[in-house]
Image (cartoon, rainbow, N blue to C red):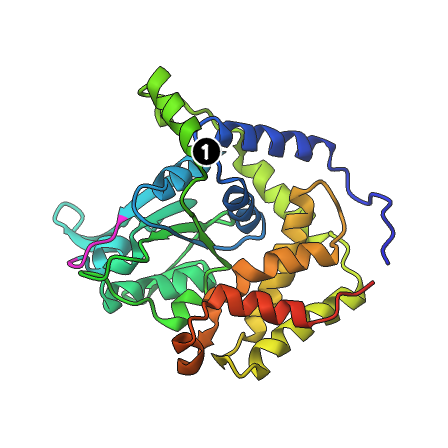
Amino acid sequence: MEDTTSRIDLTEFSEKIRELKSCIAETIVGQDIAVDLILTTILANGHVLIEGVPGVAKTLLAKLVAKLIDADFSRIQFTPDLMPSDVLGTTVFNMQKNSFDFHRGPLFGDVILVDEINRAPAKTQSALFEVMEERQITIDGSTFKMGDLYTILATQNPVEQEGTYKLPEAQIDRFLMKVTLDYPSLEDEVAILERHHHQTDFVKLHSVKPVLKKEELLSLRNLVKQVYVDATLLRYIALIIQQTRTSKSVYLGASPRASVCVLQAAKAFAILQGRDFVTPEDIKFIAVPVLHHRLLLTAEAEMEGYSAVKVTRRLIDKVEVPK
Protein backbone atom coordinates (compact mmCIF):
# COMPACT_ATOMS: atom_id res chain seq x y z
CA MET A 1 0.00 0.00 0.00
CA GLU A 2 2.86 2.38 0.82
CA ASP A 3 6.45 2.69 -0.23
CA THR A 4 8.37 1.69 2.88
CA THR A 5 11.61 3.23 1.68
CA SER A 6 12.50 5.72 4.38
CA ARG A 7 11.98 9.30 3.29
CA ILE A 8 12.98 10.66 6.70
CA ASP A 9 16.22 9.94 8.57
CA LEU A 10 14.99 8.69 11.95
CA THR A 11 18.30 7.32 13.28
CA GLU A 12 19.09 10.12 15.71
CA PHE A 13 15.44 10.52 16.65
CA SER A 14 14.97 6.81 17.45
CA GLU A 15 17.96 6.94 19.81
CA LYS A 16 16.45 9.93 21.64
CA ILE A 17 13.10 8.16 22.00
CA ARG A 18 14.75 5.04 23.43
CA GLU A 19 16.61 7.20 25.93
CA LEU A 20 13.41 9.05 26.82
CA LYS A 21 11.46 5.84 27.42
CA SER A 22 14.36 4.33 29.38
CA CYS A 23 14.48 7.32 31.73
CA ILE A 24 10.71 7.11 32.32
CA ALA A 25 10.87 3.32 32.92
CA GLU A 26 13.44 3.88 35.68
CA THR A 27 10.76 5.67 37.70
CA ILE A 28 7.36 4.62 36.31
CA VAL A 29 6.57 0.88 36.34
CA GLY A 30 4.13 -0.84 33.98
CA GLN A 31 2.57 2.13 32.18
CA ASP A 32 4.23 1.62 28.78
CA ILE A 33 1.07 2.22 26.74
CA ALA A 34 0.22 5.40 28.66
CA VAL A 35 3.79 6.67 28.20
CA ASP A 36 3.61 6.00 24.43
CA LEU A 37 0.30 7.87 24.20
CA ILE A 38 1.55 10.89 26.15
CA LEU A 39 4.72 11.11 24.06
CA THR A 40 2.60 10.75 20.91
CA THR A 41 0.39 13.66 22.02
CA ILE A 42 3.39 15.90 22.65
CA LEU A 43 4.87 15.00 19.25
CA ALA A 44 1.52 15.69 17.59
CA ASN A 45 1.45 19.20 19.10
CA GLY A 46 -1.57 18.44 21.27
CA HIS A 47 -2.71 18.55 24.89
CA VAL A 48 -3.34 15.43 26.96
CA LEU A 49 -5.81 14.64 29.77
CA ILE A 50 -4.49 11.97 32.15
CA GLU A 51 -7.18 10.22 34.19
CA GLY A 52 -6.79 7.71 37.00
CA VAL A 53 -7.59 7.01 40.65
CA PRO A 54 -5.33 8.58 43.31
CA GLY A 55 -1.94 6.92 43.69
CA VAL A 56 -1.33 5.57 40.16
CA ALA A 57 1.39 8.18 39.47
CA LYS A 58 -0.54 10.59 37.19
CA THR A 59 1.20 13.70 38.48
CA LEU A 60 4.56 11.94 38.78
CA LEU A 61 4.39 10.79 35.16
CA ALA A 62 3.41 14.25 33.90
CA LYS A 63 6.20 15.95 35.92
CA LEU A 64 8.75 13.38 34.77
CA VAL A 65 7.87 13.85 31.07
CA ALA A 66 8.10 17.62 31.52
CA LYS A 67 11.49 17.30 33.26
CA LEU A 68 12.91 15.23 30.38
CA ILE A 69 12.17 18.08 27.96
CA ASP A 70 14.47 21.08 28.38
CA ALA A 71 11.73 23.71 28.45
CA ASP A 72 10.01 26.16 30.82
CA PHE A 73 7.83 24.09 33.17
CA SER A 74 4.95 25.35 35.28
CA ARG A 75 2.51 23.55 37.58
CA ILE A 76 -0.97 24.67 38.66
CA GLN A 77 -2.96 22.89 41.38
CA PHE A 78 -6.61 23.53 40.56
CA THR A 79 -8.90 24.16 43.55
CA PRO A 80 -12.59 25.19 43.84
CA ASP A 81 -11.64 28.75 44.89
CA LEU A 82 -9.18 29.33 42.02
CA MET A 83 -9.93 32.45 39.99
CA PRO A 84 -9.01 33.13 36.32
CA SER A 85 -6.50 35.80 37.39
CA ASP A 86 -4.71 33.17 39.51
CA VAL A 87 -3.78 31.23 36.37
CA LEU A 88 -3.66 33.96 33.71
CA GLY A 89 -1.95 36.69 35.71
CA THR A 90 -2.86 40.11 37.04
CA THR A 91 -2.31 43.76 36.17
CA VAL A 92 -0.65 45.67 39.01
CA PHE A 93 -0.15 49.43 39.27
CA ASN A 94 3.53 50.41 39.35
CA MET A 95 3.84 53.63 41.36
CA GLN A 96 7.41 54.32 40.23
CA LYS A 97 6.50 54.17 36.54
CA ASN A 98 2.99 55.53 37.10
CA SER A 99 1.63 52.75 34.87
CA PHE A 100 0.19 49.26 35.03
CA ASP A 101 2.48 46.20 34.79
CA PHE A 102 1.23 42.76 33.83
CA HIS A 103 2.44 39.94 36.09
CA ARG A 104 2.25 36.67 34.18
CA GLY A 105 0.45 33.72 35.75
CA PRO A 106 1.51 30.05 35.75
CA LEU A 107 -0.26 29.41 32.41
CA PHE A 108 2.73 31.10 30.75
CA GLY A 109 5.46 28.59 29.93
CA ASP A 110 6.24 25.76 27.54
CA VAL A 111 4.97 22.66 29.36
CA ILE A 112 2.13 23.27 31.84
CA LEU A 113 0.95 20.65 34.34
CA VAL A 114 -2.63 21.31 35.44
CA ASP A 115 -3.29 19.05 38.42
CA GLU A 116 -6.88 17.97 39.15
CA ILE A 117 -8.29 20.09 36.35
CA ASN A 118 -11.89 19.17 37.26
CA ARG A 119 -11.64 20.91 40.65
CA ALA A 120 -11.84 24.48 39.32
CA PRO A 121 -15.18 26.23 38.62
CA ALA A 122 -16.46 27.04 35.12
CA LYS A 123 -15.11 30.61 35.13
CA THR A 124 -11.54 29.34 35.63
CA GLN A 125 -12.04 26.48 33.19
CA SER A 126 -12.99 29.02 30.55
CA ALA A 127 -9.60 30.69 31.00
CA LEU A 128 -8.06 27.62 29.34
CA PHE A 129 -10.28 27.70 26.23
CA GLU A 130 -8.38 30.29 24.22
CA VAL A 131 -4.87 29.22 25.21
CA MET A 132 -5.51 25.53 24.46
CA GLU A 133 -6.88 26.13 20.99
CA GLU A 134 -5.13 29.27 19.77
CA ARG A 135 -1.94 29.22 21.91
CA GLN A 136 -2.58 32.78 23.05
CA ILE A 137 -4.07 34.64 26.02
CA THR A 138 -6.09 37.87 25.79
CA ILE A 139 -6.20 40.03 28.93
CA ASP A 140 -7.53 43.59 29.14
CA GLY A 141 -7.42 43.89 25.36
CA SER A 142 -3.78 42.77 25.11
CA THR A 143 -2.90 39.47 23.42
CA PHE A 144 0.07 37.40 24.57
CA LYS A 145 1.33 34.68 22.23
CA MET A 146 2.54 31.38 23.65
CA GLY A 147 5.67 29.61 22.40
CA ASP A 148 5.65 26.98 19.63
CA LEU A 149 6.16 24.19 22.17
CA TYR A 150 3.15 25.08 24.34
CA THR A 151 1.65 21.87 25.78
CA ILE A 152 -0.81 21.25 28.61
CA LEU A 153 -0.66 18.01 30.60
CA ALA A 154 -3.79 17.82 32.77
CA THR A 155 -4.78 15.23 35.39
CA GLN A 156 -8.14 14.37 36.87
CA ASN A 157 -9.58 11.91 39.36
CA PRO A 158 -12.56 9.97 37.89
CA VAL A 159 -14.08 8.72 41.15
CA GLU A 160 -14.18 11.64 43.56
CA GLN A 161 -17.25 13.82 42.98
CA GLU A 162 -17.25 16.20 45.98
CA GLY A 163 -15.66 19.53 45.13
CA THR A 164 -15.30 18.72 41.42
CA TYR A 165 -16.86 20.22 38.30
CA LYS A 166 -17.65 18.39 35.08
CA LEU A 167 -15.43 19.62 32.27
CA PRO A 168 -17.37 21.34 29.45
CA GLU A 169 -17.60 19.31 26.24
CA ALA A 170 -15.91 22.15 24.32
CA GLN A 171 -12.92 21.96 26.65
CA ILE A 172 -12.67 18.16 26.55
CA ASP A 173 -12.67 18.37 22.75
CA ARG A 174 -9.53 20.51 22.92
CA PHE A 175 -7.55 17.63 24.43
CA LEU A 176 -5.98 15.57 21.67
CA MET A 177 -6.14 12.46 23.87
CA LYS A 178 -7.50 11.21 27.13
CA VAL A 179 -5.10 8.67 28.64
CA THR A 180 -6.25 6.38 31.45
CA LEU A 181 -3.76 5.11 34.03
CA ASP A 182 -5.03 1.80 35.39
CA TYR A 183 -3.96 -0.15 38.46
CA PRO A 184 -0.67 -2.01 37.93
CA SER A 185 -0.63 -5.77 37.34
CA LEU A 186 0.49 -8.11 40.14
CA GLU A 187 4.01 -8.37 38.67
CA ASP A 188 4.29 -4.61 38.25
CA GLU A 189 3.08 -4.00 41.81
CA VAL A 190 5.72 -6.44 43.12
CA ALA A 191 8.35 -4.53 41.10
CA ILE A 192 7.17 -1.24 42.64
CA LEU A 193 7.43 -2.70 46.14
CA GLU A 194 10.89 -4.11 45.44
CA ARG A 195 12.12 -0.72 44.29
CA HIS A 196 10.76 0.99 47.39
CA HIS A 197 12.14 -1.78 49.61
CA HIS A 198 15.68 -1.46 48.27
CA GLN A 199 15.62 2.29 47.67
CA THR A 200 12.90 4.15 49.54
CA ASP A 201 13.62 7.45 47.78
CA PHE A 202 14.06 6.09 44.24
CA VAL A 203 11.86 8.87 42.85
CA LYS A 204 14.37 11.73 42.56
CA LEU A 205 12.92 14.20 40.08
CA HIS A 206 15.47 16.86 41.01
CA SER A 207 18.25 14.66 39.65
CA VAL A 208 16.52 13.99 36.30
CA LYS A 209 18.42 15.49 33.38
CA PRO A 210 16.64 16.63 30.18
CA VAL A 211 16.93 14.25 27.22
CA LEU A 212 15.33 16.42 24.54
CA LYS A 213 16.14 20.05 23.92
CA LYS A 214 13.32 22.42 23.02
CA GLU A 215 14.70 22.89 19.49
CA GLU A 216 15.00 19.11 18.99
CA LEU A 217 11.37 18.54 19.95
CA LEU A 218 10.20 21.26 17.58
CA SER A 219 12.24 19.72 14.75
CA LEU A 220 10.69 16.32 15.54
CA ARG A 221 7.24 17.88 15.24
CA ASN A 222 8.24 19.07 11.79
CA LEU A 223 9.20 15.49 10.90
CA VAL A 224 5.70 14.36 11.89
CA LYS A 225 4.28 16.60 9.15
CA GLN A 226 6.33 14.67 6.56
CA VAL A 227 5.00 11.21 7.53
CA TYR A 228 3.40 9.43 4.57
CA VAL A 229 -0.31 8.57 4.76
CA ASP A 230 -1.97 6.63 1.96
CA ALA A 231 -5.27 7.97 0.55
CA THR A 232 -7.05 4.75 1.59
CA LEU A 233 -6.10 5.48 5.22
CA LEU A 234 -7.57 8.96 5.06
CA ARG A 235 -10.85 7.35 3.97
CA TYR A 236 -10.45 4.76 6.77
CA ILE A 237 -10.27 7.58 9.35
CA ALA A 238 -13.31 9.31 7.84
CA LEU A 239 -15.33 6.07 7.92
CA ILE A 240 -14.50 5.57 11.62
CA ILE A 241 -15.66 9.12 12.39
CA GLN A 242 -18.86 8.55 10.40
CA GLN A 243 -19.59 5.46 12.51
CA THR A 244 -19.62 7.60 15.67
CA ARG A 245 -22.26 9.87 14.12
CA THR A 246 -24.62 7.10 13.01
CA SER A 247 -24.39 4.69 15.95
CA LYS A 248 -27.55 4.22 18.04
CA SER A 249 -25.37 4.05 21.16
CA VAL A 250 -23.93 7.53 20.63
CA TYR A 251 -25.90 10.72 21.32
CA LEU A 252 -23.14 13.11 20.18
CA GLY A 253 -20.57 11.85 17.67
CA ALA A 254 -17.06 13.01 16.84
CA SER A 255 -16.46 16.32 15.03
CA PRO A 256 -14.19 17.05 12.04
CA ARG A 257 -11.62 18.25 14.60
CA ALA A 258 -11.60 14.67 15.95
CA SER A 259 -10.78 13.22 12.52
CA VAL A 260 -7.87 15.67 12.13
CA CYS A 261 -6.68 14.69 15.62
CA VAL A 262 -6.73 10.98 14.69
CA LEU A 263 -4.59 11.77 11.63
CA GLN A 264 -2.11 13.90 13.61
CA ALA A 265 -1.83 11.31 16.37
CA ALA A 266 -1.37 8.40 13.93
CA LYS A 267 1.49 10.21 12.18
CA ALA A 268 3.18 11.01 15.51
CA PHE A 269 2.70 7.42 16.73
CA ALA A 270 4.29 6.09 13.51
CA ILE A 271 7.35 8.29 14.11
CA LEU A 272 7.47 7.04 17.70
CA GLN A 273 7.66 3.48 16.35
CA GLY A 274 10.54 4.44 14.06
CA ARG A 275 8.50 4.55 10.83
CA ASP A 276 7.88 7.36 8.36
CA PHE A 277 4.54 5.97 7.17
CA VAL A 278 1.20 5.25 8.87
CA THR A 279 -0.34 1.75 8.96
CA PRO A 280 -4.01 0.82 9.60
CA GLU A 281 -2.88 -0.64 12.95
CA ASP A 282 -1.57 2.79 13.99
CA ILE A 283 -4.98 4.33 13.32
CA LYS A 284 -6.86 1.51 15.01
CA PHE A 285 -4.72 1.79 18.16
CA ILE A 286 -4.62 5.57 18.38
CA ALA A 287 -8.30 6.19 17.54
CA VAL A 288 -9.57 4.92 20.92
CA PRO A 289 -7.75 7.43 23.19
CA VAL A 290 -8.39 10.22 20.66
CA LEU A 291 -12.15 9.58 20.32
CA HIS A 292 -13.60 8.04 23.46
CA HIS A 293 -13.66 11.24 25.57
CA ARG A 294 -15.36 13.14 22.73
CA LEU A 295 -18.39 10.82 22.47
CA LEU A 296 -21.57 11.29 24.48
CA LEU A 297 -23.44 8.01 24.90
CA THR A 298 -27.21 7.69 24.86
CA ALA A 299 -29.00 7.04 28.15
CA GLU A 300 -29.93 3.56 26.91
CA ALA A 301 -26.28 2.65 26.22
CA GLU A 302 -25.21 3.87 29.65
CA MET A 303 -28.05 1.94 31.34
CA GLU A 304 -26.86 -1.21 29.56
CA GLY A 305 -23.43 -0.68 31.12
CA TYR A 306 -21.54 0.43 28.02
CA SER A 307 -18.53 2.69 28.49
CA ALA A 308 -17.28 5.21 25.93
CA VAL A 309 -14.11 3.17 25.46
CA LYS A 310 -16.07 -0.03 24.78
CA VAL A 311 -18.40 1.70 22.30
CA THR A 312 -15.46 3.36 20.52
CA ARG A 313 -13.65 0.02 20.09
CA ARG A 314 -16.83 -1.62 18.78
CA LEU A 315 -17.39 1.17 16.24
CA ILE A 316 -13.78 0.97 15.01
CA ASP A 317 -14.10 -2.81 14.58
CA LYS A 318 -17.16 -2.27 12.35
CA VAL A 319 -15.06 -0.48 9.71
CA GLU A 320 -13.23 -2.66 7.22
CA VAL A 321 -9.46 -2.31 7.56
CA PRO A 322 -7.74 -1.27 4.28
CA LYS A 323 -5.47 -3.91 2.78
In the rendered structure, the answer to whether residue 307 lies left or right of residue 54 reads right
Q: Which residue is mark 1?
A: 188
| Magenta stretch encompasses residue 13 | no
Question: What's the magenta bit mostly, secondary-structure-wise?
Answer: loop
Q: Residue at x 22, y 58 (%)?
A: 85
The image shows a total of numbered marks equal to: 1
Quarter of the image with the N terminus in it: bottom right
Decide whether residue 78 is among the magenta residues.
yes
Please provide percent x and percent y for residue 125. 30, 64
Left or right placement of residue 178 versus residue 268 in this view:
left
Can you give x and y, in whole percent of width and height, for residue 284 in the image? 65, 60
33 with respect to 63 (left or right): right
Tell me residue 37's x, y (percent).
54, 48
Query: Residue 109 sits in which quadrant?
Result: top left
The percent coordinates of residue 145 (x first, y second) are: 43, 56
Q: Is residue 241 visible?
A: yes
Task: Mark 1: give few (<14), some (14-19) or many (20+) Cα within 10 Å.
Answer: some
Residue that extends furthest to the top in the rendered view of this protein: 198
Secondary structure of the residue carrying tag 1 is helix
Residue at 75 percent across and 47 percent down: it is 276
Seen from the viewer's position, the closer of residues 271 and 296 is 296
User: Please, is residue 240 above or below residue 75 in the view?
Assistant: below
What residue is at 29 percent from the left and 52 percent from the top?
Answer: 116
Q: Quadrant of residue 255?
A: bottom right
Residue 71 in view here: no
Amino acid identity at mark 1: Asp
Q: Quadrant of the C terminus?
A: bottom right
Q: Which residues are magenta?
A: 77-81
277 up-or-down from 190: above or below:
below
